[in-house]
Image (cartoon, rainbow, N blue to C red):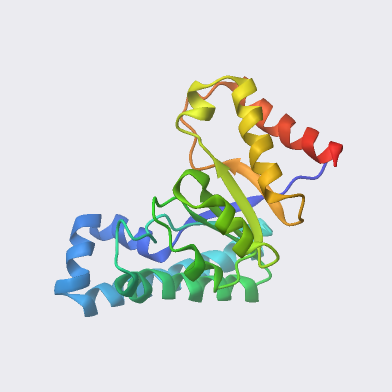
Amino acid sequence: KDVAVVGCINTPFIVTSEIRGYENLMIDLLAEPDSARKMVSVVTSSLARYGELLREFAHVDFVFMEDGTAGASQNSPELCQEFDLQYLGQLVEKYHSLGLYTIVHNCSDAPYLEEQLAFRPKALHFNNDYVDLAKVFSSFRGKTCVISGINHQNLLFRKTPQEVEAEVTKTLELWGGHPRFMIAPGCEMPFKTPLENIERLRQSVEKFGEAK
């Protein structure tokens, strides 16, 4: 049985924050913008090369791109565009030129999804709890593959398989049977998430699809 093999990276702004330290980088955006811009640019070049190696040696087709810092709770639209989003866009364009499919992930509690959608990733993944789900579904249908993230911190971790299935079914019904749609956890699952809940998530999606 064939399965997708997916590479994973943090986006340039996140990698830069890991090198510089998040608090230091946020200060740099205002106090030393030229230095911050240079650092993010160098990291972008490094990640572009990483994509080349993924394609050439690992032969992956998909790259999952973590960009959870692209949100209003962490940066203004202007600063996010200048230091985060524009470099994400450059990397998405580079990966597409290599024949890689891009999956942009944003688990921010106030995500700049429309701005990320403008880069035409092959899929966009977000946490349902942090968006107006009906509005996002209506806006994004037909523009990209939507990966709808159900609650991973409470629902998948603490609730029952029946409650997981109910949430999956509600989400799928809201989407309305249109193509280019997936369901996944909203972000990283806690280590001790019950296996039966993970299995029910998959089974619920399969059951809904078969019913259609």
- Can you name the residue that lies furthest to the bottom here? 34
User: Vertically, is 96 above or below 1?
Assistant: below
Q: Residue at x 59, y 70 (%)?
A: 95
19 horizontally vs 90: left or right: left
Q: Residue at x 65, y 36 (%)?
A: 168
80 horizontally vs 11: left or right: left
- Can you name the residue that lies furthest to the left here? 31
Q: Quadrant of the N terminus?
A: top right
143 horizontally vs 17: left or right: right
User: Vertically, is 116 above or below 177?
Assistant: below
Which residue is more in the foreground, 150 or 40? Answer: 150
Which residue is more in the foreground, 58 or 127? Answer: 127
Q: How many marks?
A: 0
User: Residue 122 placed where, x, y %?
Assistant: 65, 64
Q: Residue at x 58, y 64 (%)?
A: 53
Q: Quadrant of the C terminus?
A: top right
User: Residue 107 placed where, x, y %?
Assistant: 45, 50
Which residue is more in the foreground, 116 or 46? Answer: 116
Q: Residue at x 34, y 60 (%)?
A: 72
Please tell me in which quadrant of the rendered image residue 194 appears. top right
User: Residue 210 placed where, x, y %?
Assistant: 85, 37
User: Vertically, is 8 above or below 85?
Assistant: above
User: Residue 195 placed where, x, y %?
Assistant: 60, 22
Please tell me in which quadrant of the rendered image residue 69 appears. bottom left
